Image (cartoon, rainbow, N blue to C red):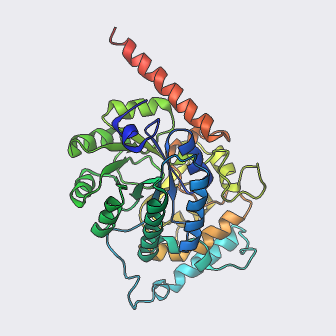
Amino acid sequence: MKTPLCERFGIDYPIFGFTPSEEVAAAISRAGGLGVLGCVRFNEPEELDAVLEWMHENTDGKPFGVDVVMPAKIPTEGSKVDLDAMIPPEHRAFVERTLDDLGVPPLPDGGDRVNTGVLGWLHSVARSHVDIAMEHTRKYGQIKLIANALGSPPEDVIGIAHDNGVAVAALAGAKEHALHHLEAGVDIVIAQGYEGGGHTGEVTSMILWPELVDAVGDAPVLAAGGVGSGRQIAAAVALGAQGVWMGTYWLTAAEYNLGAHKPGEPSTVQQALLAATSRDTVRRRIYSGKPARLLKTAWTDAWDAPGAPDPLPMPLQNLLVGEAHARISASDDPKVVAMPAGQIVGRCNEITPVEKLIDGLVTEYKDAVARMNATLE
């Protein structure tokens, strides 16, 4: 399983694994892929700094990447506008009422929204994530990629990355998005199909992948959205992609311990994922203010019910639901979770170590290619 991106990044397989878990990201890199650490959960630079230090110590010198959430259009954050004051009281009341109705208890430590991972969605905090990552790049040289989940990063951020020898990737859900990325200086286009978890567009992967490959010419494309098997990686390469970007697939990895209440046991979120089918996701704006595919639960149902308010734009929706998400994550009811997940969740049926997951992808890829080669004989 070799493409030009393997040589470019010094990896064995063109498997780019996005995850908020440093343990999973490190395991992906150790197993021959490129682990990409999601940074949005880090409110303070010191938090990310410590985790990146851990990554350097636990990746056997292998390369890895970071993923930030930096909106292309800078919001009012950073001005004199009070973002909290822009959240309507009726929205706050709805969230509190819904949590009460669903039996979600308060945070055990009495934490508030400032400490529940919402600041990572703000433009200024995303910039601090970039600064910390570049410091680590200059020190260790292992960070080889910075990806942005919300369009092209600002021009100066792309310039800073390139000055430090770091490639820049950005997600695209449409042809015009991909072309804009290239004009802005982005190196790799991540073609995120409708099936994918998190922020996603409206075009399915089978249509989107070859469309973007044709649109961007020689620029490398990573196929994303519903990838959870070696057969699908083979299909992505057949359609012109140079690799895959996978997210949901790693949520039931054995190394994933975010939200776990007992070491070695599935977290509440993992219990929900293990029970889900490919039909148990919805695409809504309730997570961040922008369309994102989520696991269908009692929480998403409440926002779909008559009388529920419309979601607020980013970053107001993040600020509104940040504490709610933290309370839900701390609870022990898998029927009430707030978690991005793609339709491939239906294949996430057991807790499996990352190394075994990647071995399975590579084996299945080889089998799929062998079957295709046999059709030419």
Q: Is residue 89 above or below residue 301?
A: below
- Between 26 and 232, the residue placed more toward the observer is 26
Quarter of the figure with residue 131: bottom left
- Between 42 and 30, the residue placed more toward the observer is 30
Residue occupying the far bottom of the picture? 80
Q: Residue at x 23, y 41 (%)?
A: 218
Q: Position of residue 119 (x, y in %)?
A: 52, 75
Q: Position of residue 96 (x, y in %)?
A: 63, 77
- Between 305 and 71, the residue placed more toward the observer is 71
Q: Is residue 303 above or below residue 294?
A: below
Residue occupying the far front of the picture? 139
Residue 106 makes an appearance in the image: yes
| In-image side of 237 versus 257 (left or right) | left
Q: Position of residue 223 (x, y in %)?
A: 38, 42
In the rendered view of the protein, which quadrant contains the C terminus? top left
Q: Residue at x 59, y 81 (%)?
A: 93
Quarter of the figure with residue 221: top left
Q: Is residue 28 above or below residue 232?
A: below
In the rendered view of the protein, which quadrant contains the N terminus? top left
Q: Position of residue 23 (x, y in %)?
A: 62, 52
Q: Residue at x 71, y 54 (%)?
A: 267
Residue occupying the far right of the picture? 262
Total count of labels: 0
| In-image side of 45 versus 104 (left or right) | left
Residue 151 makes an appearance in the image: no
- Between 97 and 54, the residue placed more toward the observer is 54
